[in-house]
Image: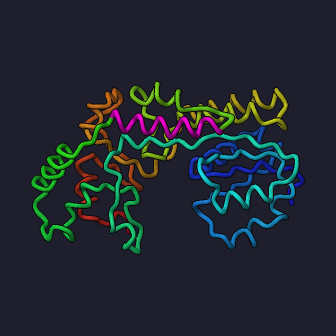
Amino acid sequence: MSTKPSLLVFGNCQAEHLAQIARQLPAVAARFQIKVIAPHTIVETDWDTRFDPAFFADVRVVWNQIESGEATFHRRMLNDRLPSGCQIVTFPPLVLLCVWPFSGSDPRIAEAKDYVYPWPDSIAASLAPSVTGENPPDDVLFAEYMRLSTARMPDLDRRLRLDAMRARAADALADIKIWDWVETRFRTEKLFHTSTHLTALPFAYLMPRLLALTGDLAPHQVAAAQRDAAFLLRGHHGQDIETVPVHPLVAERLGLTWFDPDARYNWRAHAWTFREYILKYIRWEPFMH
């Protein structure tokens, strides 16, 4: 059993990824045992088994991804069980919806039993053979997707303003602010693989700031961990297991200078173009065998 105090990371998949990075930093691993609670992966009964009071007994520091609005059940349980006197460092979730404006609903996600396409596209969903009763050739189907998506493209500047409003509300609650950094860079550097999955760059922004605010690390340990994190993330691709392609018209209207119309996007074991991804998504083609 470890005799080291614990650093607990609480939050969504971005927080999980931060914990994975922290485990690779010798100065952090020497000082802490890293624990994670990812609310999106657990159920209420886990607080009676996996996250009982003994789990929290050695928690010295918490990297806590904040949320606005009323506290969820999992967050209330976290707050109730944190040891008195432990340090809490807060950081916001990163969300950029405007780059994927059709991420609405797709009933197939709820109905599918096997692994599915979890990032919905409402235009593509409306063209599914199960909806239209038709399955035209690729060229016809893709042309119809482009026609509909162009005709229904929302005001992306307004969508960006909504993203900014939500993000600044989260920043206001956090020790670490990030939206201004995102807004000044997302057009010239790819920061997101999906609306909530990140490239390495936002992690490279967050990690040194989390380390600097972690009181149990001595200054020389912070410096060493920051140096190692910068080296580790230099060739890292972030959360790239599923990367959702960007619509060419979205790239044009938002002025995404990093956009490549011929780019291939990682999707599990595949590398698909925008066109390939859209056609496979419309037809709900299996991609895991």
Q: Is residue 135 above or below residue 273?
A: below
Res 237 visible: no
Q: Position of residue 162 (x, y in %)?
A: 42, 39
Q: Which residues are magenta?
A: 157-173
Please check the rendered image and state whether residue 37 is part of the magenta-colored stretch, yes or no: no
Q: Position of residue 1 (x, y in %)?
A: 86, 61
Instruction: Choose between 193 and 25: the one closer to the eye.
Output: 193
Please check the rendered image and state whether residue 158 is part of the magenta-colored stretch, yes or no: yes
At 73% from the left edge and 40% from the top edge, which residue is drawn?
Answer: 89
Q: Is residue 106 above or below residue 180?
A: below
Q: Position of residue 65 (x, y in %)?
A: 64, 46
Q: Residue furthest front?
A: 70
Instruction: Choose between 92 and 13: the one closer to the eye.
Output: 92
The prevailing secondary structure element of the residues shown in magenta is helix
Res 11 visible: yes
Q: Residue furthest right?
A: 3
Query: Which part of the image, by quadrant, shows the C terminus?
Result: bottom left
Q: Position of residue 249 (x, y in %)?
A: 24, 37
At 23% from the left edge and 48% from the top edge, which residue is drawn?
Answer: 275
Image side of residue 217 versus residue 116, left or right? right
Q: Residue 96 sits in which quadrant?
A: top left
